Image: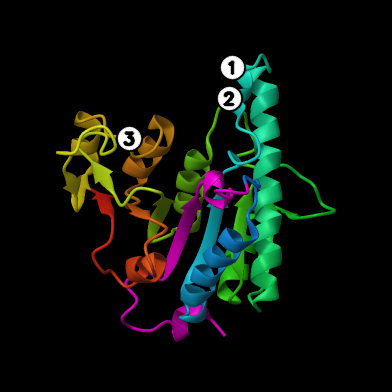
Amino acid sequence: MNPTETAQPSAKYKRIILKLSGEVLRGGKSGDPIDGGILSSVCVQVKEIHDLGVQVCLVIGGGNIFRGLAGEKRGVDRTTGDYMGMLATVINSLALMDCLEKMGVTTRVQTAIPMNQIAEPFILRRAQRHLEKGRVVIFAAGTGNPYFSTDTTAALRASEMHADIIMKATKVNGIYDKDPKKFPDAVRYDEISYIEALKQRLNVMDSTAFSLCLDNNVPILVFDLNEKGAIRKAVFGEKVGTLVRA
C-alpha cells in the first residue's frame, strides 16, 4: 500500500529527509560512540511518524566515530579523512537499520560508495520505490565524494527525491541571531528566509548544502531532537524550531 494514501490528512509533510548528526548517538556519561538508549529513542520517533504514513529518508553524519576535518588537524590527509568519515556514516546507518527493523519497520540502507555485501547502491528509482512500499530509506556514505558534508548529502537527496522538507535535528531548539550559549540575549527565529539567513551569515548548513536548498527551493526545519515528540510535531506542522524557506 502506498504510504501517501494512508497518511493522516493532518500531516503537513508526506515525504521528509531527516538529517541527524552522528554526535546525537554518542552516549553522555558512557562516552560510547553509539549509545543503545539514545539509538532506541531516535528510532522510536522515526517509527512513530512512519506508522502515520509519512515517507521517511534518513541521512546521518559520522562525527561520533570519525570526522574528516578533525582528522586533518591530526595530520590525516583530507581526502582520506573524508572517506573514513563516509565509512563512519555507514556504521551509524547500519545501527539505525538494525534498531528500526527490530521495531518492525522495514528499512533499506543505500550507499553512495558501492559495498554490496552490506547495503544497496544508491539508485534513485529504487529508493523512490522503497518509499512507495512503506520502507524507511537511509542514505549512507555521503555523496561518495570527499570535501562534501552530510548536510550537502541531505540537500542533494532531498532535491533528487522531491522531499517536502529537510528536518535537521540538532541539540539546539532552532536558529538564533547569535550563539545562545555565549549570549543570554540571543533571539530565536520562528521563521526566516534563505536570503536573510545568508545576509546574517547564520549557521544553518554549510554553504554548499545551503546553496542547493536555495536553488531547489527545499525548506529546512532546524529543531531540537531532545524535545519530546519533536519529529512528530514537526511533521504535523506544529511550532517547533526554526523554518528556513523562500
- Taking the image as drawn, is residue 77 in sight? yes
Q: Secondary structure at mark 3?
A: loop
Residue underneath mark 3: 203
Is the residue 101 above or below the residue 125 in the image?
below
In the rendered structure, are the residues bearing label 2 and label 1 in contact, judged by CB atoms less than 8 Å apart? yes
Q: Which one is closest to the eye, mark 3 or mark 2?
A: 2
Q: What amino acid is labelled 3 in the image?
A: Asn
Give the alpha-carbon distance from disc 2 to disc 1, as whole Å.
Answer: 5 Å
- The disc, 1 or 3, on the residue closer to the chain's N-terminal end is 1
- Kindly report the distance in space between the C-alpha atoms of the residues bearing marks 1 and 3: 22 Å
Q: Report the Cα–Cα distance between label 3 and label 2.
A: 19 Å
Q: Which mark is residue 7?
A: none
Callout 1–callout 3 Cβ contact below 8 Å: no
The magenta span reads 1-30
Within 10 Å of the Cα at label 1, are there few (<14), some (14-19), or many (20+) other Cα atoms?
Answer: few
Q: Which mark is residue 70?
A: 2
Residue tagged by mark 1? 73
Q: Secondary structure at mark 2?
A: helix
Residue occupying image coordinates x 49% and y 45%: 156
The stretch drawn in magenta includes residue 22:
yes
**Residue 129 picture location, percent across and down:** 61, 69
